[in-house]
Image (spheres, grey):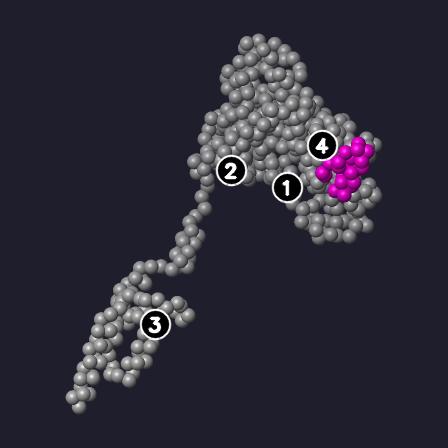
Amino acid sequence: MPTTRSRNSIGSAKLKEEANQPPEPTSTAKTNRSKSKNNVKAELPEPTRKRKRGAQDSPQKEVKTEDTKTEDTDIESPRKRSSKSSSSASKKKTRNPSNADLEAGSKMAAGFVANRNAQRAKLDPAKKNLYGFSPGQSPYPGYDHPTPAECKEVCDILSKAHGKVQKPKTIPQPSLNNSGCGEVPSVLDALIRTRLSAATNNQNSSRAFRGLVEKFGIIQEGVGKGSVDWDAVRRADVKLVFEAIKTGGLADVKSRHIKQILQMVYDENQARKEKLESGQAGGQEDAIKEEEGERKAEVTKAASNILSLDHLHLLDNDTAFNKLLEYPGIGPKTASCVLLFCMQRPSFAVDTHVFRLTKWLGWVPSDQKARTLAKALAKEQGGKPKRMGAVTRESAYAHLDVRIPDDLKYPLHYLLIKHGRNCGWCSAKMGKDAKVGVCPLSKLMSSKGRAKGTAKKWDAEDDGEVEGADDEDTGEREGEVGSEEGIHNL
């Protein structure tokens, strides 16, 4: 018996010492627990947090249960934090861009424009190619359509179907209710109106233009009489311009472009004023010498801060076209509209309707035909074939502006747009029920491009085309009919 008590006392003392020591790794702890089963029960260390099965064994410090619970409640899991942040973000209301946002975007865009103009200034004037094609040269020199006879035939057919269109002898006074296509006396007025009408329909662009009239007022005298006071727009905060045109679509982009255009025009006007006052020509590219009365009028307008681009009338067609392309947001179609409607120069603007119908008429080559022509031309010239991508509206403009006779550019532009909108077979907007009767151009389209008319089966893909993005080219005004004094109401 004494021997037994001494052994038990020694064993309990050892267990107490082990209890006061930090716990050993899990594998060692399991061994000690298995050994202690044959002895008396010992007081074990305080319980620790459970560890995942399969985790590597590592020594752990003694942690109290209460402290552990406190730490768990203080630390949020990443999943909870992300869900809270997403829910709070979804609760935030969308807002219009602030003044700082618009100003920052305006400065960035102005930097891009300045860099672009600096790069263009390094080019030889004879080699300047601002939109990828050379003015006066077709990108498809081996493609001989349309011929003058084909253009005359289509113009006659559409005139019988939709009414005769005549180019006005004088430019009508600007409307304050309709933005139009640029058929107004002032070149700057025409440019801004046409820019407003980009990527929207005539109704939306007209609302945006009326917003500018209400916000900034109109000019009371001069060539731009009756239209918006563009210098007031130039001096206004870009936020105010945004608010004035926001009903017209893409107001954020268009407000910045309008501000940049007007500032560029102001700087050009002041530079020309200084040259004219010193007896120099207003610009090196002026092809027509300005009369003395016109020079004085231009100086007076610049001194009165009446913004104007009317000096573009002094330039030839190609130079004026390239000059218009230098302004932010202005592409070949807008520049062509200003030339055709405001400056009364021969230019064939290509919108979505014109592009669709001229492809079906075979007036522009298919993508495959364009590549074949490029290879044939390269073989003839003994060089590498020019890389030819898909036929686009820009390449179609470059080709058709060369091929279509000047006297037919104005009526064909209007008639193709009206036919593209209203013909049940040719409109991208009308549905299956509108495909009745016979398209007056069906015979011409059946042999080239896309077959049209009663023989054509309805194709659901036709309804996938987006219409309205180029409706601004029509410039329709209520109450006008085809005559010598006005344009045809589309």
- Residue 112 is left or right of residue 136, and the answer is left
At x 26% / y 68%, what residue is drawn? 22
- Residue 3 is left or right of residue 461, and the answer is left
Q: Where is residue 163 in the image (x, y as percent from the top left)?
A: 75, 34
* SS of the residue under disc 3: helix
Q: Residues within 10 Å of mark 2 (few under 14, many from 20)?
A: many
Point out the frontmost of discs 2 and 4: 4
Asked where in the image residue 54 lies, by quadrant, the reply is bottom left
Dot 3 and dot 4 residues touching (CB under 8 Å): no
Mark 2 is on which residue type?
A: Asp
* SS of the residue under disc 4: helix
Disc sitting over residue 398 in the figure: 4
Q: Residues within 10 Å of mark 1 (few under 14, many from 20)?
A: some
Between the residue at mark 3 and the residue at mark 1, the CA separation in whole angstroms equals: 75 Å
Question: Which one is nearer the viewer's eye here, 232 or 465?
Answer: 465
Q: Earlier in the sequence, mark 2 or mark 1?
A: 2
What residue range appears in magenta?
367-388
Mark 4 is on which residue type?
A: Ala
* SS of the residue under disc 1: loop
Q: Which of marks 1 and 4 is nearer the N terminus?
A: 4
114 above or below 427?
above
Question: Which one is nearer the viewer's eye here, 277 or 458?
Answer: 277
Q: Name the residue under label 1.
A: 468
Between the residue at mark 2 and the residue at mark 1, the CA separation in whole angstroms equals: 20 Å
Mark 3 is on which residue type?
A: Thr
Q: Where is residue 227 in the image (x, y as percent from the top left)?
A: 56, 26
Q: Mark 2 points at which residue?
A: 252
Pick out the residue farthest to the left. 2
